[in-house]
Amino acid sequence: MLQETKKTHTEVKLPRMSIGRLADYMAASEQARRSIAQSCKYRAIARVVQHNEAKAIISNHIMSGIEGVGDLQAKADFVRNKLADDDFEIDLNEHNADYIEQFIASIPNVALPKADRFPTKQFEPLMLNGVRVTFNPQLLLRRVTKTNKVKSGALMLRYGKNKALPAAVGNWQSAGIYGYLRTLEEADKAEAERALRITLDAGTGMCHDAPSNAVYLFNEMKAACATINERWPAIKPPKSAIL
């Protein structure tokens, strides 16, 4: 009896990227862009370490308005010492605890603008020249001006262990946040404000707000999406992939 070969990847038939991966793509070399597009089209089936728990703990801490560390170290210790069923879960807990502890070390460098902070919500993907671009911020931001104008924004966390987020990637991602939310202005009755469109590097505490040329950068992202859409059918799977 022949043993069934296990699949290693699934193919995403229609072009799809998160704003974070699109930012990585925009800041990358042409060779790295091919690798990013390939990883978005062919998703590995194997379990991948995610930082969802760390992101939730950090975003709740920021939303609470507590100055300083608060109980973050206790929460990092709890995550690290949680019961785990296998080596993967042990590794997952370690990575999430490390994420929180790096943020703790970076807190003195975090300088967020004054604004009300709200839990995030689910956003529909934005179709940019044939590419479905997903947007999953960790927090929503809002402030009211002296003339009673509502200014809205969002914060997204990025993290690389012992590695700072490149400024170019942070600028591209915040420009993507700016561009995405501008499409909601009419329905939301709020106006875009670059200072409230933030990518926060949880490892260093650096806040990358949307740059002054955010509109231009977002238009460049749209143009890149047209190219990604055209190339998508021709992107080949990794050599070792089993579909």
Image (cartoon, grey):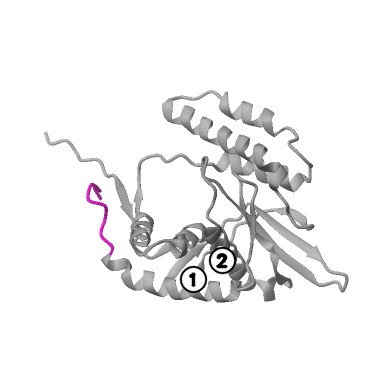
- Residue 35 image offset from top left, x and y in percent: 34, 57
Q: Measuring 53% from the left and 61% from the top, which residue is drawn there?
A: 168
- Residue 96 image offset from top left, x and y in percent: 55, 36
Which quarter of the image is occupied by the N terminus? top left
Q: Is residue 160 left or right of residue 12?
A: right
SS of the residue under disc 2: helix
Residue on which disc 1 sits: 221
Residue 159 versus residue 149: which sits nearer the camera? 159
Q: Measuring 55% from the left and 46% from the top, which residue is drawn there?
A: 159
- Vertical placement of 8 versus 189: above or below? above
Please report contact status of discs 1 and 2: CB closer than 8 Å, yes or no: yes
CA–CA distance in space, label 1 to label 2: 8 Å
- Vertical placement of 234 versus 1: above or below? below
Residue 130 in sight in this render: no
Residue 103 versus residue 43: which sits nearer the camera? 103
Q: Measuring 53% from the left and 41% from the top, which residue is drawn there?
A: 51
- Vertical placement of 119 versus 80: above or below? below
Q: Which mark is residue 176?
A: 2
- Residue 137 image offset from top left, x and y in percent: 61, 55
Find residue 113 and report its image quarter: bottom right
- Vertical placement of 155 versus 96: above or below? below
Q: Is residue 239 magenta?
A: yes
Q: In the image, which residues are magenta?
A: 235-243
Residue 177 in sight in this render: yes
Q: Is residue 72 left or right of residue 225?
A: right
Find residue 177 and report its image quarter: bottom right
